[in-house]
Image (spheres, rainbow, N blue to C red):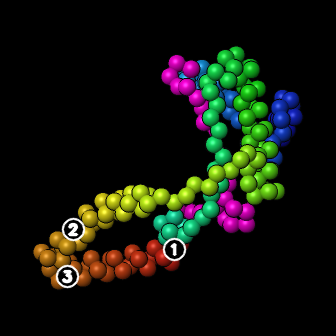
Amino acid sequence: MEVARSKGLPELKHHLLPRTKGFKLCARVGRKYIQAFYDVEYHFDSGIPEPTMMDVLRGKPHHLHIYCRRIPIEEIPEDDEACAKYCHELYRIKDTNYEYFERHGRFPEKTYEIPRRPHSVLVFISVSVLLAVPPMKCLLDVILTGSMYMIAGVVLGGLLGTVVWYNTY
């Protein structure tokens, strides 16, 4: 806050001051290669802690709100100082959107509910099979060609790993 006050920048309550040098560089170089930047904000429902990787792996459902805005590259000023001001203004808007979401439970623009699609389930099943088949084949090879000690070691290792996994998280 002190840095923002001393430099005459907007004071942000929910975000850190943006690093404008990297933004200016991306905007300058990006003019040759890209047509737009995408400003993305996300927010989880209030009162529910943000998910951890363990929550995701365990399949715990979370409701995520996403605000995405397309910014054409022509809209971003070419001058370094004007570009930095533009970046600070973007973050001021992000801060305002965050406060609005905290009060109303949604972002200020029109909202769209994305329905679940059947092909998402097919993609999930396909990826699961691709990830599960190699370890299952390895386990089957151990069971079919290994000694009783090797089989017992693999089974006990799996049980121990499972117990540690669930007790750690």
SS for tag 3? Answer: helix
Crowd band around label 3 with a 10 angstrom C-alpha radius: few (<14), some (14–19), many (20+): few
- Judge left or right: residue 98 versus residue 74: right
Image position of 140 with respect to 108: above or below: below
- Taking the spot 36% from the left edge, 63% from the top edge, the residue there is 125
Image position of 132 with respect to 83: above or below: below
Label placed on residue 149 = 3
Label placed on residue 137 = 2
Question: In x, y percent, where is residue 66?
Answer: 64, 50
Find residue 140 and report its image quarter.
bottom left
SS for tag 1? Answer: helix
Question: In x, y percent, where is residue 128?
Answer: 35, 63
- Residue 143 painted magenta: no
Question: In x, y percent, where is residue 9?
Answer: 83, 32
- Tell me if residue 22 can be seen: no
Label placed on residue 168 = 1
Q: Which amino acid does label 1 sit on?
A: Thr
Q: What residue type is labelled 3?
A: Tyr
Spatial separation of the CA atoms under disc 3 and disc 2 = 19 Å
Q: Nearer the viewer, residue 124 or 144?
A: 124
- Taking the spot 29% from the left edge, 80% from the top edge, the residue there is 155
| Magenta region, residue range | 31-53
Image position of 9 with respect to 147: above or below: above
- Tell me if residue 160 can be seen: yes
Of the image marks 1 and 3, the number of the one nearer the N terminus: 3
Of the image marks 3 and 2, the number of the one nearer the N terminus: 2
